[in-house]
Image (cartoon, rainbow, N blue to C red):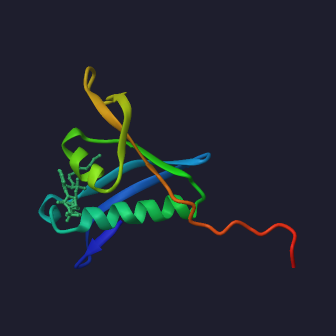
Amino acid sequence: MLELDDVVAGWHRVRREGSRAELEDLWLEPERIGGGYGRKLFEHAVRIARDGGARALEWDAEPYALGFYERMGGIVIGETPSAAEPGRRLPRMRLTLAAARARPQRGGA
Ligand SMILES: CC(C)(COP(=O)(O)OP(=O)(O)OC[C@H]1O[C@@H](n2cnc3c(N)ncnc32)[C@H](O)[C@@H]1OP(=O)(O)O)[C@@H](O)C(=O)NCCC(=O)NCCS
């Protein structure tokens, strides 16, 4: 959750699913759009996914936010039928997470 001036300005939800994580939600109050907060939220979601050990973050994007997500490094990997609106399809996106953790050394001292 992103709080600005003690008011909730946006949030995201990340759910771990095996080796990948699902970005279930990313939302910003309309008056905060365009101020760099979307990037902050997305980068926070990436950190949580990576720290949880996920190797990829995936999500269903709102079509009008596609450009934002591409700017964040996401790529379209398919389409998901919208659960909310029959007939509507949402771009399915993925960000591959770089190996962030040092692997434990085997053997050696
Ligand atoms: C999509 C959303 C999260 C973007 O947040 P934002 O705070 O406006 O984005 P930022 O200001 O952090 O922008 C980060 C970069 O993405 C770019 N960008 C933002 N929205 C974009 C768009 N729709 N298309 C292309 N680029 C976009 C910005 O220009 C910026 O580029 P820069 O790195 O060159 O500066 C925000 O608009 C939003 O919450 N919208 C309403 C709810 C919503 O659509 N949620 C997504 C549901 S899946």
Between 1 and 35, which is closer to the camera in this rendering? Answer: 35
From the viewer's side, name the closer residue of 103 and 88. 103
Compared across the picture, whether 83 is left or right of 88 comes to right
Quadrant field for ligand 1:
bottom left
Seen in the picture, residue 103 relative to 58 is either above or below; the reply is: below
- Measured from the top left, where is residue 69 in percent x and y? 29, 51
> Quick one: quadrant of the C terminus?
bottom right
Q: Is residue 22 above or below residue 107?
A: above
Residue found at the very far left of the displayed protein: 31
Horizontally, is 65 left or right of 109 in the view? left
Residue drawn 29% across the image and 72% down it = 3
Residue extending furthest toward the front: 108
Q: Which of the 4 image quarters holds residue 59?
A: top left
Q: Is residue 92 left or right of residue 105?
A: left
Q: What x and y, as percent, mark residue 97?
A: 50, 56
- Looking at this rendering, what residue extends furthest in the top direction? 87
What residue is drawn where x is 32% and y is 29%?
A: 82
In this view, 94 is above or below 41? above
**Res. 1 image quadrant:** bottom left
Whole-percent x and y of residue 85?
A: 26, 27
Q: Position of residue 79 (x, y in %)?
A: 35, 29
Residue 45 in the image: above or below residue 7: above
Residue at screen point 35% across, 60% down: 42
